[in-house]
Each structure stands twice: as C-alpha cells, then as structure tokens.
Image: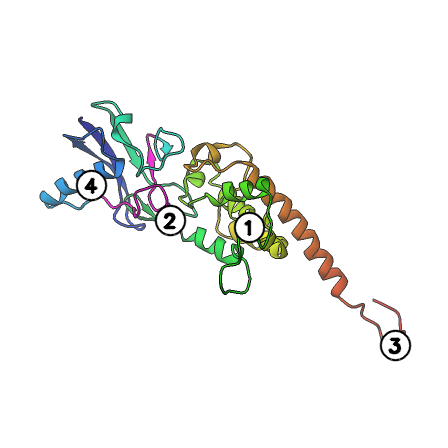
Amino acid sequence: MKLTLKIWRQKSRKDAGKFVTYPVDNVSSEMSMLECLDVLNESLIERGEEPVAFEHDCREGICGSCGFMINGVAHGPMPATTVCQLTMRHFKDGQELVIEPWRAAAFPEVKDLVVDRRSFDRIIASGGYVSVSTGNAPDGNAILIGKEIADRAMDAAACIGCGACVAACPNASAALFTGAKISHLSVLPQGAIERDHRAVNMVAQMNAESFGGCTNIGECTAACPKEIPLEVIATMNRDYIRGSWKQRDNIVTTIAPVTEWSTGSKL
C-alpha cells in the first residue's frame, strides 16, 4: 500500500505548528496505525530529519496512552478501536490521512501528536479513590454484589482515560471520563461512603481544568474505544446534585446562631 500522511508538526507549545505531508510506501495492510508511523519515523531518521512524536505504551488498547485524530475522527474510522489497534487494511491504497493531536484547552500541546493530559490525573486525584484499610484481599463472597450492579461498575471501569471523548466533543467536555470514574466507584458498596463528596470534588476539579460543559450531544460515547455508556454522565449529575445539597445542609446546620450580648437576640 501507498499512503499520504498529512501530519501536524509542532516543536513545542510555544512554537507555531503546521501540517507536513509525507508519502509512505510499502505499507502492509496488517500494520497498525502506530506501526505505520514507526516506518515513517525510521525513514525520517535515516534522512536526518526529526521523527514524529506520538504517545504509545502497551499497543494493545489497554493503557490509554495513544490517541490522535485521523481525518477528523478520534482514533480513526473504526468504532471501539484505539489507534494502536487500528490496522491499515481499513484504509484504501493511495488514501490521504490527516493526522492531528487532540484539540482542547485542557490538553495543551507538548510536541507533534503529544498533548498534556495531566488534567485527567488531577480529576482522579481529587476523588477517584476509595479510603479503605489495606491488607489481604477479602474473600470473593465477603461482600455480595448483584450482577446488575457489578456489570454497571465494570462497564464504567473500562474507561482507559485516552481523551477521545474530550477530542470528539464540540465543547471539549470531560463529562464522560469524569462520569465513568465516579460511576464505577459509586455504584459499589465499597465506594458508597464517599459517594457524595467524591462527585462534588471531581466535578469541581473538572470545571477548574477548563473543560467545556456537557450538552448531551453524544459524540463522546460514539468516539470512546471502550464504548462507555452515556448513562455515566447522568450518574455523575445525580451524585453531584445530591452531594451539593448535603454539603449545603451540613454548612447550614453546623453554623451556630450568633447571640448579641447587649440584647440577647439572635442575629
């Protein structure tokens, strides 16, 4: 196969970027998209040029490291597929592929196809955990969990944090990611005790990271390589509203009335 790769090149976030066109010959239909970039980079290095920077790790669709736009679609044209799983047989011989990084204010450019996604880490750090005593693993039947609840938790926990949902959303919203991280803990008994303030803290951090608001367009779940259901956003909204009201009630009830000493009346 012969392909034309039109790739976004940018040395750093301070430098201006541009698309550069590279013809690539002898592309095997069995190669993954990342292997195709490896072939391109080998030829660039041989010519003394700077290779294209892109993120990767497991190359098995598990780690969530890889990800970029291919012809305007996050992770490319195949549903439920990361770019490391996307094989070149899904493209036509002689086709031009426009490859660019995730575009979002919360994902600042690092270099070429690499963006800074540490905003996701900060969202998780704000509440995506369960405070339980460590020790030996409990027996599998110690806490009975119904299959429906277990399935909901596992569906949400499948999120790999790649950022495709943000890149696909017209608002650059992280609602699907945050909803998945909230949902997979909140529906389980181990995470119930921190359910309310977890949602409040994680949504607050999501907003602080300059992600856009969710308007239920649904592009996020369509682009998600793990097909995270849109229902996790509803779970996030429900937990956030309940947590906000509980937090408000706690503030009101814990503030003691102030007494004016001269008259004895309550302020």
**In which quadrant of the rendered view does residue 76 lie?**
top left
Mark 2 or 3: in front is 2
Q: Earlier in the sequence, mark 1 or mark 3?
A: 1
Asked if residue 152 lies left or right of residue 108, the reply is right
- Whether pointer 1 and pointer 2 mark residues with C-beta atoms closer than 8 Å, the reply is no
Amino acid tagged 2: Pro
Q: Which SS class for mark 2?
A: loop
Out of 95 and 26, give the one closest to the viewer. 26
**In which quadrant of the rendered view does residue 26 lie?**
top left
Magenta range? 52-71
Residue at image location 45% in from the left, 43% down from the top = 159
Mark 4 or 3: in front is 4
Amino acid tagged 1: Leu
Amino acid tagged 3: Ser
How far is mark 4 from mark 2, CA to CA? 24 Å
Q: Label 3, on which residue? A: 262
Q: Residues within 10 Å of mark 4 (few under 14, many from 20)?
A: some
Q: Which mark is residue 38?
A: 4
Image quarter (top left, top right, bottom left or bottom right) of the C terminus = bottom right
- Whether pointer 2 and pointer 3 mark residues with C-beta atoms closer than 8 Å, the reply is no
How far is mark 4 from mark 3, CA to CA? 81 Å
Q: Label 1, on which residue? A: 185
The answer to whether residue 69 is magenta is yes
